Image (spheres, helix red, strand yellow):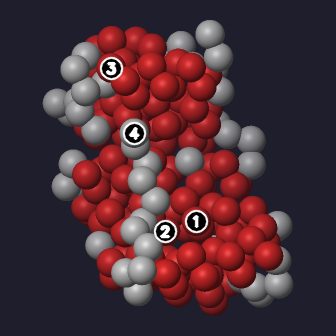
Amino acid sequence: MTPTIYRDQVAQIAKTDTEGAAELARKITDPWFEAQAWSHVARYADRPLVFTRKAAKAASKTKDNYRQSAVRAWEIAALAERKYFDQARQVLSEAVEVAQTIEHEGSKAEAIMLLFPASFKISKSDAELVARVFEETSPMTHWRAKRALKDIALVLSGERPPRAFFW
């Protein structure tokens, strides 16, 4: 099976079978989808921090700063859902720091467009901080950066809901 199919299966069974979901997550060979899968497991596990650590480890194995930063959005969202706000803020801080090092402006914007709604799950003020960092560190010359800025403004104004991470 492909990493996406495994990740999707983990998402489907994590709610009712944490151990089975973890068994499937261990089979995922692509770090991006593995990190997402562990984040799905963390949403329902008795000990979610065990699984968010696995998500972080998988994220660290991805091949570039975009992936290392952006995929942590699922981890942040899972931590926030479970009310581990301090841990979610720490991961958010790490992910935003990595995102700031992304050289390609479009890729940086895409990473922020994943981290921003995850930060919104912590609090609106955390989301505003991510938005401010993005505005201050991006030259806003790439169309993706301009789109990200517009989308962020719509979410902060309440005109659009933040992106959902889990299905």
- How far apart are labels 4 and 2 at the CA level? 18 Å
Percent x, y of residue 154: 49, 81
Q: Mark 3 Cα within 10 Å, few/some/many (few <14, many 20+)?
A: some
Percent x, y of residue 65: 70, 55
- Do labels 2 and 1 touch, CB within 8 Å? yes
Q: Which residue is at 34% across, 30% downward?
A: 41
Determine which of the numbered discs, if any, sits on residue 116 in the image. Answer: 2
Q: Label 4, on which residue?
A: 167
- How far apart are labels 3 and 4 at the CA level? 12 Å
Q: Mark 4 Cα within 10 Å, few/some/many (few <14, many 20+)?
A: few
Q: Secondary structure at mark 4?
A: loop
Q: Earlier in the sequence, mark 3 or mark 4?
A: 3
Percent x, y of residue 52: 37, 40
Q: Is residue 88 above or below residue 35?
A: below
Q: Is residue 86 left or right of residue 69?
A: left
- How far apart are labels 3 and 2 at the CA level? 27 Å
